Amino acid sequence: MDMQTSFLDRLFDSGLLIDTGVDGLYGRSGQFEDVISAFERLIDTFGGADGAEAIRFPPGMNRAFFETSGYMKSFPQLAGTVHSFCGNELDHMSLLKCMEVGDDWTKDQQATDIVLTPAACYPLYPTVAKRGAIPENGALYDLQSYCFRHEPSKDPARQQLFRMREYVCMGSEKHVTDFRQSWMDRGVEMMKAVGLDVTIDVANDPFFGRAGKMLANNQRDQNLKFELLIPITSVANPTACMSFNYHQDAFGTKWGLNFADGRVVHTACVGFGLERIALALFHTHGLDTKEWPESVRKALWG
Ligand code: ATP
Ligand code: ZN
Ligand code: MG
């Protein structure tokens, strides 16, 4: 049995995660959720004074916006779409027959107007674009959403439906890169406060295919993505628990995000992987929060 399986099994045995029979799709106990709530309050204490506008989208987004985002160009392997039965009574009969004999009953499902949200910030850009110009001194948003990625795994830190808390900043290049740097500093400080060992490293997204390799190399060379890493299932390969992304003017151009005089805005987003942070805490301090070091409990629960 490898290390990953055993941490997952310990999480199941302790009841912190609940097996659904699908890798990467888990229920969570009250104690697990308490840790996530407490950590989100800690995020609020670090980011709360910045005056971000809080917005919460459901875990599905407008398919048309998803198509415009270009997600299928970059990450077709990760996307999840919502399909439904749209037939008549006759179609229903054949659907039930199909299920009865164990044939594939899903092939006649039709695409709906909803796709699963791949990252908390995706629904934001078209929403903000619709409102009009971005103020000269920039705009800041506070988001949290369940996100879907089709990457089934036995690694409890790689889930298919997980929560991402994000701050998204729009404005000048200097404004959004300062924002990103300040959260890199805050991230290190926050994790230290809860007793986690962290490193920050340059990173890239897993762009699909051969052309994707070039996008990934370009992203690295230009320092567009950093990750805050914490050992969870492996010390040699620590897990990304936060990411810090600078999109230059790519999203501004794509969505028509402009200042009043027409200049395209730059954007950056900072994401917290909430399940990963909770798992890092359980892995580091043990599976029972009552046994966690006093300083950690104090940072989380006051
Ligand atoms: P990884 O390299 O581990 O796949 P990522 O680069 O795909 O991570 P981002 O797209 O930057 O991650 O997402 C923001 C944050 O969401 C990550 O820093 C991580 O904490 C969290 N996250 C990403 N994918 C998952 C997942 N499958 N399960 C749980 N959390 C995730
Ligand atoms: Zn984002
Ligand atoms: Mg990934």
Image (cartoon, rainbow, N blue to C red):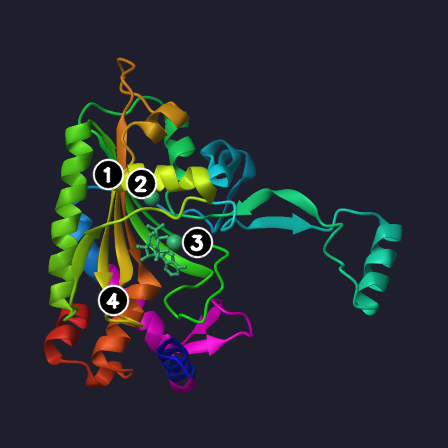
Q: Is mark 3 within 8 Å of ligand 1?
A: yes
Amino acid type of the residue tagged 3 in the rendering: Cys
Amino acid type of the residue tagged 4 in the rendering: Ala
Which mark is first along the chain, 3 or 4? 4
Residue on which disc 3 sits: 147
Is residue 59 found left or right of 36 in the rendered image? right
Q: Which mark is residue 217?
A: 2
Q: Which residues are magenta?
A: 13-41
Which mark is first along the chain, 1 or 4? 4
Question: Label 4, label 2: how many angstroms apart (C-alpha)?
Answer: 37 Å
In the rendered image, residue 25 lying in the magenta stretch gets the answer: yes
Question: Label 3, label 1: how many angstroms apart (C-alpha)?
Answer: 27 Å
Q: Which mark is residue 221?
A: 1
Where residue 206 appears, as percent x and y from the top left, is 39, 48
Q: Are marks 2 and 1 in contact (CB under 8 Å)?
A: yes
Amino acid type of the residue tagged 2 in the rendering: Asn
Is residue 192 found left or right of 290 in the rendered image? left
Is label 3 in a helix, a strand or a loop? strand
Which-is-in-front pick, marks 4 and 2? 2
Is residue 21 in view?
A: yes
Residue on which disc 4 sits: 38
In the rendered image, residue 168 lying in the magenta stretch gets the answer: no
